């Protein structure tokens, strides 16, 4: 059997904190909690889901913007990503790598894998340029069934 855990080199909470400090960004307790929560799951989750889970984690009600602002911060720092098709968030699996946006999304269990594939990215770039197109941002999301969910 193959390992069930999706491979991820996401930064630990302590590493994320050190990363933010090195950039002069403040990893506040709320930002830290939201990131820790996201690391504990391999599924991409909506902002609403994360708000709900955060309230359970902390045992109190939170103003939604508190969590949404923490997500915005983590996005800007590149510690997490947002999937366009499902409006959900996941921790970055390849911090520090050049990012092109290439994701495998299991529609059964929600596990999302972030890929870095220079061959695929190069091909897309070449085809775009051949069409006289100047790409600004790439979002490729494949929806389907992951190895664990396939019969
Ligand atoms: Zn990433
Ligand atoms: Zn699955």
Image (cartoon, grey):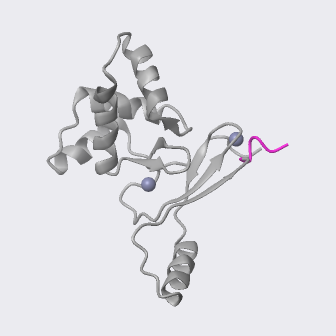
Residue 75, given in percent of the width and then of the height, sits at: 34, 47
Q: Is residue 69 left or right of residue 91?
A: left
From the viewer's perspective, is residue 75 above or below residue 136?
A: above
- Spot occupied by residue 112 in the image (x, y as percentages of width and height): 58, 46
- Left or right of 146, for residue 26: left
Please state which of residues 4 and 118 is positioned toward the viewer in this rendering. 118
Residue 54 screen position, x and y as percent: 40, 22
Q: Residue furthest left?
A: 24
| Residue 21 place in picture, x, y as percent | 18, 44
Residue 15, visible in the rendered structure: no
Q: Main secondary structure of the magenta part?
A: loop
Q: Residue at x 57, y 80 (%)?
A: 123
| Outermost residue, front side | 132
Location of ligand 1 given as a quarter of the image: bottom left
Q: Which stretch is magenta?
A: 146-151
Question: Residue at 41% of width from left, 25% of height from top?
Answer: 51
Q: Pick the quarter of the image with the C terminus.
A: top right
Q: Is residue 72 magenta?
A: no
Q: Residue at x 71, y 47 (%)?
A: 146
- Residue 33 seen in this snapshot: yes
């Amino acid at each position: 059997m193959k390992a069930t855990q999706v491979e991820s080199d996401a930064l630990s909470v302590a590493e994320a904190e050190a990363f933010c400090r090195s950039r002069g960004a403040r990893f506040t307790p709320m930002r830290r909690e939201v990131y820790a929560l996201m690391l504990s799951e391999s599924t991409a989750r909506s902002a609403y889901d994360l708000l709900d889970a955060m309230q359970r984690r902390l045992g109190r009600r939170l103003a939604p913007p508190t969590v949404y602002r923490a997500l915005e911060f983590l996005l800007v720092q590149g510690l997490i990503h947002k999937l366009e098709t499902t409006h959900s968030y996941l921790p970055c699996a390849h911090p520090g790598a050049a990012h092109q946006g290439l994701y495998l999304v299991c529609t059964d269990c929600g596990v999302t894998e972030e890929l870095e594939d220079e061959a695929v990215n190069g091909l897309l770039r070449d085809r775009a340029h051949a069409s006289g197109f100047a790409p600004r941002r790439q979002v490729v999301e494949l929806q389907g069934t992951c190895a664990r969910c396939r019969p």
